Amino acid sequence: MNKMSDTGRKLKIFAATVAAVLLAGFFVVHFIKSADQRNLGRETAASASACPIVNVVAAQNTPSSLPLTLPGETAAWYESIIYARVDGYVARWNSDIGDHVQKGQILATIETPELDAQLAAAQAKLKAAQALVVSRQADAEFAKTTHERWRDSPKGVVSDWEREAKKAGYDSAVAQLNAAQAQVGLDRADVDRYVALTQFKQVAAPYQGTITERRIDIGNLVTAGSSANTTPLYRMVRDDPIRVFVDVPQSAAGDIKVDTPVQISASNIADRVFDGKVTRTAGAINSKTRTLRVEIDIPNLDHALVPGMYINSIFHVPTTGLVQIPAAALVFRSGGPQVAIVDKDNKVNFHEVAIARDNGNTVEISSGVSSGDAVILNAGSQIFEGCTVEAHESSKDYRPNAPAQKQ
């Protein structure tokens, strides 16, 4: 009995001890949480009462000109698909892709047995027609002398009917001579046509350029013409000078004129810039893309630029003399675009602005901002009219096409 009583008393003491420890732990945790909540409240109140920190940049007058970078593509000065002008088969080809050829250089030779036979037949026909002319000419001379003798004979020697018959015979002989001479002209024209066609047996380059495609080989049958079912022989281009086409957005189309300076660069030609000027423009806005097609002609003596390349073009366009600010300073609200400006007392004022030109990372403002105004960049919802802020000047370069800064 005593042992059981001791065991029960020990259990009660242990339970009371555990309960006391748990109660003490609860009060300690509650005290810590209360202290944390009081600290958080003080920090929140201090943060709410502190001035928001904002990055600002000064509005500036636009320079006399601004660079406008646009993508473009190169195109050949000439590009030709060369077809056969005669039927036959390829006897020899002399030029392959990548070859630079001169005007008149023979690219391939076509054998034309049918054309050769037609030319021989036409020449034989011409000789026969010329022989007939000789015969008709002799007949006409004989008919002429006979007609003159009968015409000049004394009255009563020959009848009037005989005179008229000899005159009709002479006229008929002259007509037959004229017909024979006309046939000679027709036959000679056929011969000349076949002779001209035989010149196309030699496929010649139409101008100085580069072969970009060859689609023939020895023994291939070729057909004259350029229909959809006709296989071309060659494709060639002239790339000196070379054309550059750029589609200028409508917003900048009015600033791109003939002789506007342009700098051309390509990613695959490192450390090289090609200087040029606008040669011509389409003079109309494309209704589908709302862009103006612009062409720049560039000398290409070393053939560094090839047709079909993607390039970057930098136009130097005149500015309007307005104020420019970073595009990040614009705030778009229901009333239109606005700019948050920090005054000398670090108070925020929202100004409605009118955008004159969008240059990408900068915009030109025609009203609402003056040169030197401190505009807030990326103004958030915590920035409101009349609030006090702590302004820090931004070190980022917002000029158009500014060089990338090192991190």
Image (spheres, rainbow, N blue to C red):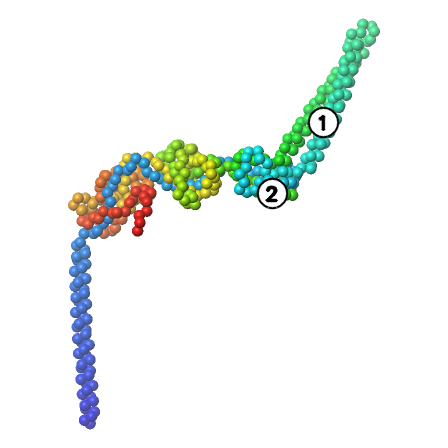
- Can you see residue 162? yes
Q: Nearer the viewer, residue 117 or 156?
A: 117
Q: Residue furthest bottom?
A: 1
Q: At 40% from the left edge and 41% from the top edge, which residue is drawn?
A: 272
The quarter holding residue 294 reads top left
- Can you see residue 225? no
Q: Is residue 399 left or right of residue 116?
A: left
Q: Amino acid at mark 1?
A: Leu
The quarter holding residue 234 reads top right
Question: Which quarter shows the N terminus?
Answer: bottom left
The x, y position of residue 224, in whole percent, is 62, 37
Q: Is residue 275 left or right of residue 239?
A: left
Q: On residue 115, which mark appears?
A: none
Q: Residue furthest top?
A: 155
Q: Amino acid at mark 2?
A: Ile
| Front label number (2 vs 1) | 2
The quarter holding residue 361 reads top left
Disc 1: which residue: 126
The x, y position of residue 61, in whole percent, is 26, 38
Residue 166, above or below 231: above
- Dot 1 surroundings within 10 Å: few (below 14), some, or many (20 or more)? many
Question: Secondary structure beneath disc 1?
Answer: helix
Disc 2: which residue: 216
The x, y position of residue 307, in whole percent, is 48, 40
Q: Is residue 6 left or right of residue 159?
A: left
Q: Nearer the viewer, residue 317 or 174?
A: 317
Question: Secondary structure beneath disc 2?
Answer: loop
- Asked if disc 2 and disc 1 are in contact, CB closer than 8 Å, the reply is no
